[in-house]
Image (tube, rainbow, N blue to C red):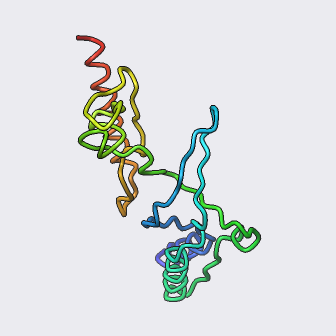
Amino acid sequence: MESILATAWDERLAGPYDVIVVGSGYGGAITDLDGDNLRIDWPGAGRESIFQQINQECFAHAKALGASFIENAAWHLSPWKTLVTAHPLGGCPMGEDGSHGVVGHFGKVFRDDTQAVHDGLYVADGSIIRSALEVNPFLTISALTERIVENIVASLTH
């Protein structure tokens, strides 16, 4: 029985696996509103040294496990080294006032460099987190969003 379970376990682990890596990179993106379209320009983002470091670490781990590491195939085919992110962070960071952020701690958008806010305009997603957390930000984003929504509902019912 033990050898049957060990074989089943080994076969389950033998397949290919995607690896998601969390890291901090250069925050040099420039955003611009072109009519109704948001344009993001981030020259050289995919060529930052952090991505070479990540690939070297993944290769070392795979080698230590007796596995193979296959770099993102699209990067070998594309000269642009485009990036994909599941949780874009920092585009509308929280701050004490408009001179230190785009939104306050309840997601209200500041009007200017003061604490004055636009009535009814909120941001409630990962963009209010100033920078990468070095861990998956899903729970932090969810908690902040829930807090903001509860505050909006409370303000509408009072």
Image-based side of 157 in relation to 132, left or right: left
> Measuring 38% from the left and 21% from the top, which residue is drawn there?
120
> Against 50, is 89 above or below?
above
Q: Residue furthest right?
A: 77
Residue found at x 46% / y 60%: 27
Give x and y (percent) for residue 110. 34, 33
Q: Is residue 134 above or below residue 155?
A: below
The foreground one among 45 and 158 is: 45
Q: How many marks?
A: 0
Percent x, y of residue 44 = 60, 68
Residue 106 spot, x, y in % from top left: 28, 33
Q: Residue at x 37, y 56 (%)?
A: 131
In the rendered image, which quarter contains the C terminus? top left
Left or right placement of residue 116 versus residue 71 in this view: left
Q: Is residue 68 left or right of residue 54?
A: right
Q: In the image shown, does 70 or 92 lie closer to the viewer? A: 92
